[in-house]
Image (spheres, rainbow, N blue to C red):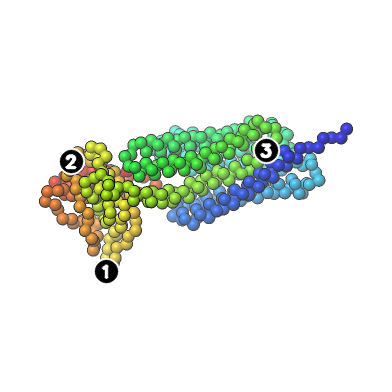
Amino acid sequence: MSQAAPDYNDLIGPFLIGAFLDVFFLGIVMLQSHSYFRKCQEDKKLYQYSVAFLYLVAVLHTTTACYSTYERFVLNYANPEFLLVAGWSFTTGASLTGITAFIVQSWYAYRVYVVSGRKKLLPAVILLFSFASVGFSIACTVVGTHLKYFPRFVEFTYGVLIWLYGSIAADILITVSLVFYLRKASERTEFHETRSLLGLIAANVVENNLLTMIWACIDAILFQASKTAWHVAMNDSLSKIYFLSLLTSLNARRRISSDVQRRRPSLGGPSSPGMGRSTLTGQQTRNTPAPVALAQGLIRTVSRVSERLVPLGQGEKAKGGTLSTPIEVSLTREISTSEMIIEPEPEFERYNRSSLQRPKAATTPTLKLQEIPFRNDSDRLSSSSLRDSGSQSSEKLAIL
């Protein structure tokens, strides 16, 4: 009796489709990487070096996947037995995928560390799962090269499952924790704009991590439940999905910032509640909505269109264009809202950082707010002083 012909649909199809998807996602990675290096040149060097390294890893992974396909279907075209051989070009992809996932998940673990108020337990658990995943992915490369034939991979099934499910567990913790802490921060603030910003960030987290988690779950389920090689079609492009998750998160910062700026004109305006206008020290504003009383001792001020003033020398002109951000003012004592009528600053010819003279009202006190810029993305701003010019009493301003 003649031997039954092998099912080439299961032997060839997964590797061919996997290579196609890998090349397709590499094109998207190139586009996103180009966008990152063009728009985010002021990022931390660590971020830039990480993106550059992951880009090289992505190119190397696609190269090995394409060579594995070429070796399997061209160099050994008349050798059906080679379809059962896992060459070095195929097994190398496991470690490259694990390294990519580990770097991306470490970046997200740091984000969790920041938004959680620098709590270490949850980021440590995420890194533990991620470290176990990358460790077993490297072990899959070593053991797979040693075993050589696909049918023998069942001897190391537990290692592959720990690699895949460890990465999935880290993705779940990252997504759930980031959304939880962002929603918690959103509930604590009374700013509609701040809530919108946190909502956009949370949606971006879900969009980026949910696809990665689903892709990895399908890969793990196919490997565990199916006796064919169709999990290879998902696994070949898994590293690109992780890298795209990082790139889209980094590139989305400008889009989110632009969305917030576009929404600013809708905050406040003629119909907004409030008693008057406010001006930040060192910053001249136009069309500024009135302060809004949020609670007892809590005010909100928003500058819609602003011009940043800088210290001037003789004959120099002011440079403008920087938009101010909303601030929350927390007073240590209750101030009657009927007394909080703040007149806008007159036109400046010269700005003096140490003292800014303003006309005193006879009966209405004038508030001066001093804005302090962030030093980095994780620092909270320290409190500055809030002075009542009418009573000369000292208050505290908290900028969140």
Q: Work out whether 278 lies above or below 176.
A: below
Disc 1 residue type (three-letter): Gly
Query: For mark 2, what is the residue?
Result: 336
Query: For mark 1, what is the residue?
Result: 315
- Residue situated in front as seen by the camera: 261 or 222: 261
Disc 2 residue type (three-letter): Ser
Asked if residue 131 can be seen in this view, the reply is no
Question: Mark 1 or 3, which is nearer the eye?
Answer: 3
Query: For mark 3, what is the residue?
Result: 230
Residue 264 position, x and y percent, is 35, 49
- Residue situated in front as seen by the camera: 341 or 100: 341
Left or right relative to 298: residue 25: right
Instruction: Choose the circle earlier in sequence order: 1 or 3.
Output: 3
Picture mark count: 3
Q: CA distance from mark 3 to mark 2?
A: 70 Å
Q: Secondary structure at mark 1?
A: loop
Question: Mark 2 or 1, which is nearer the eye?
Answer: 2
Instruction: Choose the circle earlier in sequence order: 2 or 1.
Output: 1
- Crowding near the residue tagged with mark 1, few <14, some 14–19, many ≥20 C-alpha atoms within 10 Å: few
Q: CA distance from mark 2 to mark 1?
A: 43 Å
Q: Residue at x 68, y 49 (%)?
A: 66
- Residue situated in front as seen by the camera: 384 or 198: 198
Asked if residue 24 can be seen in this view, the reply is yes
Q: Work out whether 38 lies above or below 179.
A: below
